[in-house]
Image (cartoon, rainbow, N blue to C red):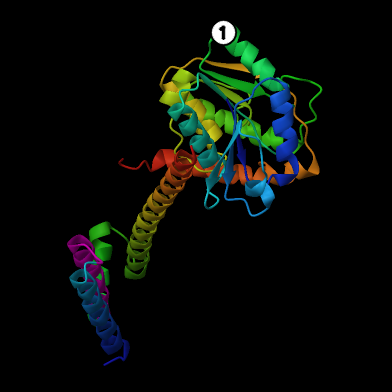
């Protein structure tokens, strides 16, 4: 058995446990926890059954080679994560700006 | 009221305020946008209100704070201008006169209508790109969308809420004014580009960033 078939599932399990721990502490929503668990389960499954899963993905999407299928799915996943990060940062920025504006007006109100 | 968004403008601020007062516009609101120089410590007389952003958020955010203050105080019109000395302060009179004659909601000082203005090529290029982009969204063509000198009527002050932080607010204002069917007019204004104001304003790179930010903001709207 190849070493990565042991290491990757162990790492995946560790991250799934971490996600559930974050959920228990109220830092993650149930949706985020399930989503991340599914992603890590998928990675573990690919490590254990690489040919079967990648060939199946390639067939489903009509992509010729299984390597290409993995790259496309990986890229799609990365874009999804990137988009979520972008929206989250934008929202945080907006909240900070609103806070700064309100503080400036409140300080002036106190002076007057 | 005249609103001056200011970030590290200690060298010009006092002079600009004195010039504005000499034009008989006694109500000035400076929005110190988290400056790290002496901008926030300059002492003015009681006619000048200084609002302080505790951290730097950008010229769009600072302008919005000034407009919100004007709204609170029920001002009938607000003129905003950059505090880096690139504008001729007497152009405030030109904008105000236009307002009195037309009662327009948004009056934009157009830097390209005066042949005597020496505008760097990079600024002209960026402005053209921004005009096209803004025009596409606003469905109205303005030939100087990125001008820092503007007049807002009371209706515009109440109707326009600026959501963007940086220079992209210039386009945002036009898009929102157009969407709310406010009357927009342009008047020719002077502009002076010095090495100081060039370092502060929108260069070509900053221009691309501005267009990207505006695009991103229009694309990803928050649920408020």
Image height check: is A44 above or below B185? below
Res B85 visible? no
Q: Chain of mark 1?
A: B
Locate residue A56 relative to residue B142 in the image: left or right.
left
| Residue at which label 1 appears | B102
Q: Residue at x 62, y 12 (%)?
A: B98
Mark 1 surroundings within 10 Å by alpha-carbon count, few (fewer than 14), some (14 through 19), many (20 or more) = few
Residue B4 shown left or right of residue B218 in the figure? right
Residue ranking furthest to the top:
B101
Residue B163 drawn above or below residue A20? above
Report whether B51 appears left or right of A66: right
Q: Is residue B195 visible?
A: yes
Q: Nearer the viewer, residue A106 or B87?
A: A106
The relative height of residue B185 versus residue A43 in the rendered view (above or below) is above
Decide if residue B169 is on the left or right side of residue B180: right
Please name the residue shown 34% across and 43% down the image: B222
Image coordinates for residue B112, horizontal then vertical, percent:
71, 23
The location of residue B224, given as percent across then percent down, is: 31, 40
Q: Main secondary structure of the magenta part?
A: helix
Q: Count up the numbered dots.
A: 1
Location of the N terminus of chain B (image quadrant): top right
**Magenta stretch in the rendered image:** A27-47
Q: Secondary structure at mark 1?
A: helix
Determine the residue positioned at 36% across, 70% down. Answer: A67
Q: Quadrant of residue B179?
A: top left
Residue A71 rendering spot, x and y as whole percentages:
37, 66
Q: Quadrant of residue B119?
A: top right
Q: In the image, is residue A33 part of the stretch drawn in magenta?
A: yes
Q: Position of residue B85 (x, y in %)?
A: 74, 35
């Amino acid at each position: 058995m190849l070493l990565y078939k042991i290491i990757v599932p162990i790492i995946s399990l560790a991250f799934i446990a971490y996600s559930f721990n974050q959920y228990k502490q109220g830092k993650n929503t149930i949706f985020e926890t399930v989503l991340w668990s599914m992603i890590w389960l998928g990675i573990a499954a690919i490590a254990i059954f690489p040919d079967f899963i990648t060939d199946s993905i390639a067939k489903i999407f009509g992509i010729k080679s299984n390597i290409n299928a993995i790259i496309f799915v990986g890229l799609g996943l990365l874009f999804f994560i990137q988009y979520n990060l972008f929206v989250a940062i934008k929202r945080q920025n907006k909240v900070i700006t609103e806070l700064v504006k309100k503080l400036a007006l409140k300080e002036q109100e106190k002076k007057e | 009221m005249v609103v001056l968004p200011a970030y590290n403008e200690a060298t010009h601020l006092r002079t600009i305020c004195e010039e504005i007062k000499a034009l008989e516009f006694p109500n000035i609101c400076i929005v110190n946008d988290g400056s790290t120089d002496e901008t926030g410590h300059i002492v003015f007389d009681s006619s000048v209100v200084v609002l302080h952003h505790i951290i730097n958020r950008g010229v769009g955010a600072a302008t919005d704070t000034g407009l919100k203050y004007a709204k609170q105080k029920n001002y009938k019109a607000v003129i905003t201008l950059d505090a880096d000395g690139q504008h001729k302060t007497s152009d405030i009179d030109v904008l105000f006169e236009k307002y009195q004659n037309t009662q327009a909601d948004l009056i934009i000082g157009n830097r390209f209508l005066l042949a005597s203005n020496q505008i760097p090529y990079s600024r002209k290029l960026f402005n053209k790109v921004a005009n096209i982009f803004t025009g596409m969204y606003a469905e109205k063509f303005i030939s100087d969308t990125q001008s820092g000198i503007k007049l807002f009527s009371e209706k515009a002050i109440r109707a326009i809420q600026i959501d963007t932080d940086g220079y992209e607010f210039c386009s945002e204002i036009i898009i929102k004014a157009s969407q709310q069917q406010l009357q927009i007019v342009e008047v020719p204004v002077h502009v002076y580009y010095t090495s100081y104001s060039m370092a502060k304003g929108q260069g070509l790179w900053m221009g691309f960033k501005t267009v990207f930010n505006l695009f991103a903001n229009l694309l990803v709207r928050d649920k408020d």
